[in-house]
Image (cartoon, rainbow, N blue to C red):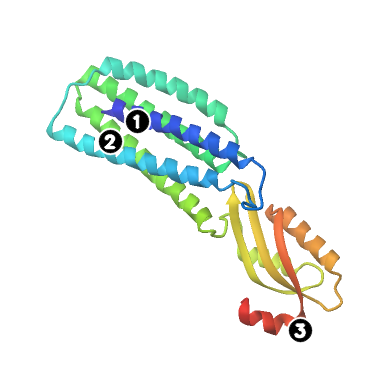
Amino acid sequence: MALLAEAFHVLIDVVALGIAFVAVWLGTRPVTDRRTFGLLRLEILATVLNTVLLLIVAAVVLVEGVRRFSEPSQVQSGLVLAVAVVGLSSNAISIFLLRDPDASFAMRAAYLDVLADVAASIAVIVSALANIFAGRQLADTFAAFLIVALIVPRSFSLLREALDVLLEATPRDVNVDSLREHVLACSGVVDIHDLHVWTITSGMNVISAHVVVHSGADPSVVLDDLATCLRGDFDIEHSTFQLETEDRKRIESGTHP
């Protein structure tokens, strides 16, 4: 049972890596008038698809594991042990190849998935040894449940992050209050409203806002200061600001709070 769970998990890993590779590749294609951000969001959609597949696998393994309690079956522990050792070795190589803290969302998800695979392979090895040396048939089923316990929390976490991107939630690494304070500290800035911060894809946070400036402020200087502030303090390269004078604040505040 544990070997089946691990096999399903590895299969999903292969599919996930393939989907992630295709999504990242398509994301590099040029933008068009119809798709002004290109296909960058495909990476996020790929992550959603991969996590849903993982949850389906976890459900299948959980149901099969419960059935094994009432209908025990013989486990070929030697074969399970051999395959688990091979799986552990291949996962160790995958970790080495995927280790990149600056990788895309999908690739980081794949890296975390492989880390869980390592733990799952170790659980399968332990269960096989328990069956060989102590005759613990149910160790295999418990190992399968452990694999499910490793898959589900991580899958929900990744799914939540991906859905946040699709729903254009504020990026987790951006504190809006701090960002607002930094903008207000820029030269010539009086106020800021209609502030929106969201993520297009991995490493691409975007901001748009209405910025109220002093009547005598130089727009070019204000925009340069804002861009420098966001680039240096928040790693936001893509920004869109509408500069407004103080006499428009009353009008704009009614439609753009």
Checking the image for residue 61, the label placed there is 2
- Comes first in the chain, label 3 or label 1: 1
Between 55 and 1, the residue placed more toward the observer is: 55
Spatial CA distance of label 3 from label 1 is 63 Å
Between 251 and 203, the residue placed more toward the observer is: 251
Residue at x-position 38% and y-position 39%: 54
- Comes first in the chain, label 3 or label 2: 2
Residue 70 spot, x, y in % from top left: 12, 34
- Comes first in the chain, label 2 or label 1: 1
Q: Quadrant of the N terminus?
A: top left
Q: Tell me the SS state at disc 3.
A: helix
- When the figure is inspected, residue 85 is found, relative to residue 201, above or below; the finding is above
Q: Tell me the SS state at disc 1.
A: helix
| Residue receiving disc 1 | 8
| Residue receiving disc 3 | 247
Q: Tell me the SS state at disc 2.
A: helix
Spatial CA distance of label 3 from label 2 is 64 Å
Residue 124 spot, x, y in % from top left: 32, 26
